[in-house]
Image (cartoon, helix red, strand yellow):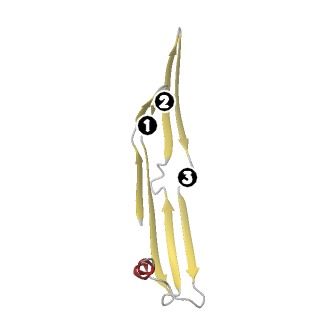
Amino acid sequence: MASLNYQAPRITTQGKDKSQYSIDLGLAQDIMKGKGTLTFNVRDLLNTRRRRSITDIMLDDAHLYSRSDFQWRVRQLTLTLNYRLNQQKIEKKEREEGFE
């Protein structure tokens, strides 16, 4: 699984917001003869998920200019082990057929 999130730059009433982008990546592998699943996820693979903006306001004789750069949580790595007790893994195709 992979996802790319991109938000284009935009002009606001008081300045502009710069572009934002990030990549999330996940891998899963069945183990223990299908009784377990090992999953590895990376959020913000390139550590680029941040909000950047510029405020530029003219007030009579004053000029206000400000740049901001805010980064949410830094890159996260998650390793998960799911183990199924007394049940089999339901394949995606079987789940979809169950909804018909």
Name the N-terminal-most of marks 2 and 1: 1
Q: CA distance from mark 1 to mark 3?
A: 19 Å
Q: Amino acid at mark 3?
A: Val
Labels 3 & 2 near each other (Cβ < 8 A)? no
Measured as percent of width and height from the top left, residue 98 is found at 45, 81
Please tell me whether mark 1 sits on a helix, a strand or a loop.
Answer: loop
Q: CA distance from mark 2 to mark 1?
A: 8 Å
Please tell me whether mark 3 sits on a helix, a strand or a loop.
Answer: loop
Mark 2 nearby-residue class (10 Å; few <14, some 14–19, many ≥20): some
Number of residue marks: 3
Measured as percent of width and height from the top left, residue 36 is found at 53, 84
Residue at which label 2 appears: 54
Labels 2 & 1 near each other (Cβ < 8 A)? yes
Measured as percent of width and height from the top left, residue 19 is found at 42, 40
> Who is closer to the viewer here, 7 or 66?
7
Residue at which label 1 appears: 18
Measured as percent of width and height from the top left, residue 37 is found at 51, 80
Q: Nearer the viewer, mark 1 or mark 3?
A: 1
* Image height of 51 relative to 11, above or below: below
Q: CA distance from mark 3 to mark 2?
A: 22 Å
Q: Which residue appears farthest toward the right when viewing the image? A: 85
Q: Amino acid at mark 2?
A: Ile
Q: Amino acid at mark 1?
A: Lys
Quarter of the picture containing the N terminus is bottom left
